[in-house]
Image (cartoon, helix red, strand yellow):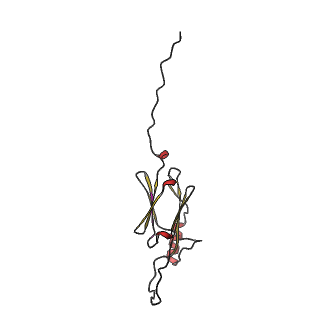
Amino acid sequence: MLMRTDPFRELDRLTQQLMGTSGTWSRPSPMPMDAYREGDDYVIALDLPGVSTDAIDIDVERNMLTVKAERRPVPKGDTVQMELSERPLGVFSRQVMLADTLDTEHIKADYDAGVLTLRIPIAERAKPRKIAIGRESTQKQISG
């Protein structure tokens, strides 16, 4: 149902962690993601701890799902002296190519405990269904 769009994204993530760089709008950091099927929904869960809902942007254009988020620094007073700063700030983004079998018109998004969960219904045309077999008529009318 999904296709990874950037095979080097994991390498970029590791490099950013080692170098301590933050994502920018022109070069956003990746966000961890899980994707799985649950019943008639395809579920994508993205880790965005510390990001407020107004800083999350979700778009679908054709079959490309794009999630962008920004974690901003928490305002600190003049008397605060930072001793350690390991939590990444900046812009995070993830793009996922969705299959034609998903109903992108009815995506639902929930955000709880730092996890953005997207539920994408599987399109009716993609669900398994039984095909009835018709009978060929064997009776012929005799005209007389």
Name the residue rendered at 42%, 51% in the picture. 40
- Tell me where residue 7 appears, x and y as whole percent: 54, 63
Name the residue rendered at 50%, 52% in the picture. 103
Instruction: Name the outermost residue toward the front.
Output: 54
Q: Quadrant of residue 110?
A: bottom left
Q: In front here: 51 or 135?
A: 51
- Tell me where residue 1 appears, x and y as whole percent: 49, 53
Q: Is residue 134 above or below residue 79?
A: above
Residue 22 among those drawn in magenta = no
**Number of numbered discs visible in the structure rendering:** 0
Instruction: Name the outermost residue toward the top.
Output: 144
Q: In front here: 11 or 65?
A: 65
Magenta-colored segment: predominant secondary structure: strand
Q: Is residue 65 above or below residue 85?
A: above
Instruction: Name the outermost residue toward the right.
Output: 26
Name the residue rendered at 47%, 89% in the picture. 78
Region in magenta: 43-49
- Tell me where residue 114 appears, x and y as whole percent: 42, 69
Q: In front here: 8 or 55?
A: 55
Q: Is residue 72 above or below residue 118?
A: below
Q: In front here: 124 or 46?
A: 124
Q: Quadrant of residue 117?
A: bottom left
Q: Is residue 92 above or below residue 39?
A: below
- Tell me where residue 37 appears, x and y as whole percent: 43, 54
